[in-house]
Amino acid sequence: MAEERPKYLIKAGKRLDGRKPGDARPMKIETGVIENAEGSAMVEFGKTKVVAAVYGPRDIHPKHMMRSNRTLVRARYDMLPFSVEDRKRPGPGRREREISKVLSETLNTAVFVEKFPRTAIDVFISVIQADASTRVAGLNAASVAMADAGLPMRDLVVSTSFGKIHDEKGKGHMVVDVFKPEDNWGMADIAYAKLPNLDKYVLLQMDGNVTKDEFFKGLEMADKSLDDIYKAQVAALKKKYMEGSK
Ligand code: CDP
């Protein structure tokens, strides 16, 4: 039976999990989690848990995808059957294919792709526990995993979500890092990614409606959160290499 829409998702400035509008969930970023991969990382945003593994540059199959002047960064996003409450059918469906395409496009912007012509860099993004915002968690994991693999990058990719949720009077409020009830019952949710040092927007996807003012308010909150994510990404990479150099 479908759950009923809650009367509110925010009341007196507090969201259902107690967060304030601008608060992200507790975050954890770790690198070097899969030994067999060239680079890897795990990202947790609250209960959302995602692992990324990078292989390549390597031969590209099918061959017709080969580009003579560049490598192709190919992200494959997968949500594992046990990652959601109702078991998810294994394998990529329409949603996974679309997300993989969008994440591939985003990740290609961060890599000096012309350095490795005629090859592919494969990035496997596996959602092992889903509580919304999995694609943006996946992008952060992929970005750290690519840096961990030693790929030449023009910048890291930092990513978060923001959205609009209703209070008890039905009024919308902008919030950062949407979790499942907010994704299900909220008025809008937006996936957002940026190359932070180049100040370039590389992903913006929206479900729902917001006004222009609401959008920019959400963006400002999200940018604050991206600063923290960038710091956590750099710290995770430094930690691994400092440990490695001991
Ligand atoms: O995860 P993300 O917010 O990037 O993408 P979404 O398509 O908006 O999905 C939101 C959330 O719905 C996921 O993170 C899962 O928690 C949940 N979901 C699910 O339970 N079963 C699915 N087949 C797809 C999504």
Image (spheres, rainbow, N blue to C red):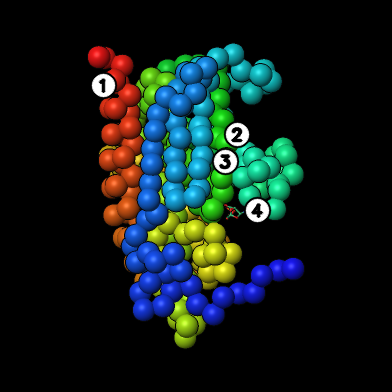
The local secondary structure at tag 4 comes to: loop
Q: Does label 2 or label 3 sit earlier along the sequence? A: 2
Residue labelled 3 has its Cβ within 8 Å of some atom of ligand 1: yes
Residue kind at label 3, given as amino acid type: Val
Q: Which residue is mark 1?
A: 242
Label 4 belongs to which residue?
85
Report whether residue 2 is seen. yes
Q: Is residue 110 visible?
A: no
Please tell me whether mark 2 or mark 3 is closer to you in this view: 3
Few, some or many residues within 10 Å of mark 2 (<14, 14–19, 20+): many
Q: Which mark is residue 76?
A: 2
Q: Identify residue for label 3.
A: 127
What amino acid is at disc 1? Met
Q: Which mark is residue 171?
A: none
Query: 46 left or right of 134?
Result: left
Assign a secondary structure to mark 3: strand
Q: Residue at x 54, y 64 (%)?
A: 181
Q: Residue at x 31, y 16 (%)?
A: 244
